[in-house]
Structures are given as C-alpha cells and as structure tokens.
C-alpha cells in the first residue's frame, strides 16, 4: 500500500479509501469488523462515512472499530442529506451543519472529523452561507478539513474564490462519482483538482457493480445493486453502459485480472485521483478491490481500457482541440 498527500492538507492517506456505507446495513457489525480488519491489514488508513449511512449506524460501528487507534486513521463524514422528519433535518445551513457535526462526533466517539463533506450542493442557500457554517466548525476544532461531494466544477470554483476572498477554510477534497462507465469528472472536475491541488476520492469506481464481471448486454445476476436498487438501476441506465461492461469483462478476463481489481486500478490511474473509495458487503467481495494496488496500470494499459467507453466531451466542446 502506498500513501499519498491529500491535496494541500499535508495529510498522507492510503491509495485506497474504504467506504463504510455497508456498515450496519448490508454488513452486520461482525462482518463490518472483519472488513475493517482486512483493510487495516492491507494498509488502508482512510475511511469514508456519512451521517445518513444506515441511519447513523455506520458511524457508530466505525467509531467502535477505530477505538484504540484513532490517531492512526483518517475519518470522513458528510452532511446535507435528510436525517429526520423535521423540516430543518436536512440541508447545508449553519444550524444543520453544527448539529450534524455534533451528532457524528457522538456516534464516532471522537473529538474531530478529519474531513467533512457537503454531501450535495444545496441550491436553497448562498454559497457564502454554507462556507460560513463550515468555517465555524473548522474554527471550533471539530472539523479539520472540508470537502465537496457531488458538486459541479463551477460550484467548487465559486466556493474556492469566496473562501480565498474571505480568508475562510476552503474545500480541500472532492468526492465525485467516477468509473469507466461514468467519466464526466474528466471534463472539468479532475482538471480543476489538478490545477488547484485538491484531493480527490471518487466513489463507485466499479460503476455500482456494472464493472464487476457480473453484467453484460444480456447478463445480470440474481442479486446486486443494479438489479435490486431502483436508484442505481436508473443511474447506470445510459445507452452503452452494459456494452462497455461486457467489453471490459472480456478485456479483464483475457488479461488474467479480476474485473473489480482492474476497474479500481483504472480509476486510481488518473493523475487527478488521490484514493478511489472501495466498498463491499463482505470480506470475500472486498478482496479483489484490495488487490487493485497490485495492478501495474501503465499509461498504455489505461489508454487501452479507456478506449472501451466513450470519453466525455471536452469542457468547451471543441473536439478538434482534444489532446
């Protein structure tokens, strides 16, 4: 396991981040513990969570697992999502952010969150109001660094300008969706991250399971997110997704590499990516993702794999200028 600087924070994180969304949901506490142990044995020191994962149980389980080695791990959490029936139990207001940070700290049984992400862009608020609330929790010492998940590049750029002008904490880390079947981040988000020295920890590097080797044009497993979860099925319903999945599976099999290992390694091979977020329901499913660090993702190999899917248009839509 290699360790990389997380943007401009000076913090070194493992080249893989483990996402704890399954903790307390698809994985009970015992299986969560086994996966956490497997990650630590592999050298992972970076764990991503959120206040909404399993209605808070994910953070509670993670908190128990990190007890005794809190200073050796980097922990993230998120807020913005709906956490209750009350009209104010959601969003990015200062009131909600402060309250959710306190709740996450309680569940994680820690005195600080290393990186707090805004889970989504809150269109109901001025960006200044969101950043003011984040500055408050950073100044309190309860949050060390802030990040943005699912933000457009222009939204991040606007926030960076405001933070610079106001002298407030800036977004240091981004968490976009990114995989061979979801490449929009290549147009603006990843180039911006490279330009501004932002850490990037993409989620769903296996495309919600589409690149796991189980899916094709006429092939679907009996179980899986893309079968059982309506949101994921819609997310990956774009034309060409399953054609790419089938071609990718064939490529991985011919190369003698597990498709999950290759999919994660492809994401990690982008120069703008710090640590792909991997996840699993059990240790057996986790193993090939951990083995992605053993894949020698050369520029030629990455280019060959990239050719299996359609690259997004350049930001200015001038195809003739694509390098």
Image: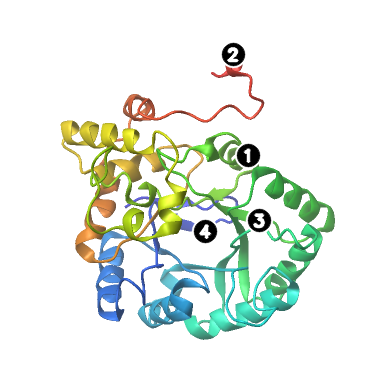
Q: Nearer the viewer, mark 1 or mark 4?
A: 1
Q: Residues within 10 Å of mark 4 (few under 14, many from 20)?
A: few
Q: Which residue is mark 3?
A: 171
Does any portion of residue 275 appear in the rendered image? no
Circles 2 and 4: CB atoms closer than 8 Å? no
Secondary structure under the numbered disc 2 in the rendered image: helix
Residue 275 spot, x, y in % from top left:
43, 51
Circles 4 and 3: CB atoms closer than 8 Å? no
The label shown at residue 129 is: none
Mark 4 or mark 3: whose residue is earlier in sequence? 4
Q: Which residue is mark 2?
A: 320
Mark 2 or mark 3: whose residue is earlier in sequence? 3
Q: Nearer the viewer, residue 171 or 175?
A: 175
Report, in whole angstroms, how far the alpha carbon at label 2 lies from the one at label 4. 39 Å
Does any portion of residue 243 appear in the rendered image? yes
Residue 4 spot, x, y in % from top left:
45, 50
- From the viewer's perspective, is residue 42 above or below residue 178? below
Report, in whole angstroms, how far the alpha carbon at label 4 lies from the one at label 3. 14 Å
Secondary structure under the numbered disc 1 in the rendered image: helix
Q: Which residue is mark 1?
A: 192
Report, in whole angstroms, how far the alpha carbon at label 1 lies from the one at label 4. 20 Å
Report, in whole angstroms, how far the alpha carbon at label 1 lies from the one at label 3. 12 Å
């Amino acid at each position: 396991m290699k360790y990389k600087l997380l943007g401009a924070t000076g913090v070194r994180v493992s080249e893989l981040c483990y996402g704890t969304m399954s903790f307390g949901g698809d994985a009970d506490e015992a299986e969560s513990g086994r996966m956490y142990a497997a990650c630590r044995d592999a050298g992972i020191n970076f764990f991503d969570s959120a206040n909404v994962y399993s209605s808070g149980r994910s953070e509670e389980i993670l908190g128990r697992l990190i007890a005794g080695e809190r200073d050796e791990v980097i922990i993230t959490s998120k807020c913005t999502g709906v956490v209750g029936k009350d009209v104010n139990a959601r969003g990015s207001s200062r009131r909600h952010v402060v309250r959710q940070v306190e709740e996450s700290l309680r569940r994680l049984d820690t005195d600080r969150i290393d990186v707090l992400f805004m889970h989504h862009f809150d269109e109901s608020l001025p960006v200044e109001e969101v950043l003011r609330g984040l500055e408050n929790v950073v100044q309190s010492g309860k949050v060390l660094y802030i990040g943005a998940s699912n933000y457009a590049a222009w939204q991040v750029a606007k926030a960076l300008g405001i933070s610079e002008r106001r002298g407030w904490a800036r977004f240091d880390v981004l968490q976009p969706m990114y995989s061979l079947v979801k490449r929009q981040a290549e147009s603006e988000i990843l180039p911006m991250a490279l330009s501004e020295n932002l850490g990037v920890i993409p989620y769903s590097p296996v495309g919600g399971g589409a690149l796991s080797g189980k899916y094709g044009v006429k092939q679907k497993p009996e179980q899986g997110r893309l079968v059982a979860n309506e949101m994921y099925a819609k997310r990956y319903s774009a034309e060409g997704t399953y054609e790419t999945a089938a071609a990718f599976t064939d490529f991985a099999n011919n190369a003698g590499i597990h498709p999950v290992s290759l999919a994660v390694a492809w994401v990690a091979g982008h120069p703008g990516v710090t640590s792909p977020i991997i996840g699993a329901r059990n240790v057996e499913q986790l193993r090939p993702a951990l083995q992605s660090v053993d894949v020698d993702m050369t520029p030629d190999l990455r280019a060959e794999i990239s050719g299996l899917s359609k690259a997004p248009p350049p930001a200015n839509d001038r195809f003739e200028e694509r390098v």
